[in-house]
Image (spheres, rainbow, N blue to C red):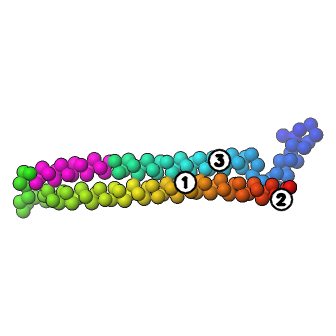
Amino acid sequence: MAGQDGRADGEATRRTDSGEAGPVGAVLVAFEQAAVTAEARRVREAGADTAESAASLVAALEEASAAATGMGAGGPAVLLAGPALAECAALLARRARDLDAECVRTADAMDRAAGLLVDADEEVAGRVAGAAG
């Protein structure tokens, strides 16, 4: 809205015309950074939850493997004998660790992207200040 002398509208136009982000732009960059950072946190949590869930399944497979081995099960008709269950548990554990590591790498990349948003905003603000002053 224009002030009594009409300068408020003109000032807003000059800020927009000069390319300066202004307060609204700063809020948008901060919002984008917060959103990216929150998503990075969710990716990390999902990776940790997946690894935790896999760990409980690995433990169950290891128990089944020990039980199958201890009971002497393993005749020709048995589909998954003790050693096969242990192999499944090891494979699952390895894949869970790999997935967790990938989630951490993805979240780290998202954090770097959030930092780049701030760097870009500061660079633009510096250019605008240099051009104005």
**Boundaries of the magenta span:** 53-69
* Left or right placement of residue 32 versus residue 16 in this view: left
> What residue type is disc 1 on?
Asp
Residue tagged 2? 131
Q: Residue 110 in the image: state x and y as whole percent.
A: 54, 55
Mark identifier at residue 48: none
User: Mark 3 sits on what residue?
Assistant: 30
Secondary structure of the residue carrying numbered label 2: helix
Q: Residue at x 61, y 54 (%)?
A: 115
Disc 1: which residue = 111
The N terminus is located in which quarter?
top right
Query: Can residue 38 be seen in the rendering of this structure?
Result: yes
Name the residue type under label 2. Answer: Ala
User: How many numbered discs, if any?
Assistant: 3
- In this view, the residue in front, 17 or 101, is 101
Secondary structure beneath disc 1? helix
Q: How far apart are the two marked residues, 1 and 2, measured between alpha carbons? A: 31 Å
Magenta run includes residue 57 = yes
Mark 1 surroundings: few (<14), some (14-19) or many (≥20) residues within 10 A: some
In which quarter of the view is residue 18 placed? bottom right
Between the residue at mark 1 and the residue at mark 3, the CA separation in whole angstroms equals 13 Å
Question: Distance from label 3 to label 2 (Cα)?
Answer: 24 Å
User: Which residue is rendered at x = 68% and y = 57% of the image?
Assistant: 120
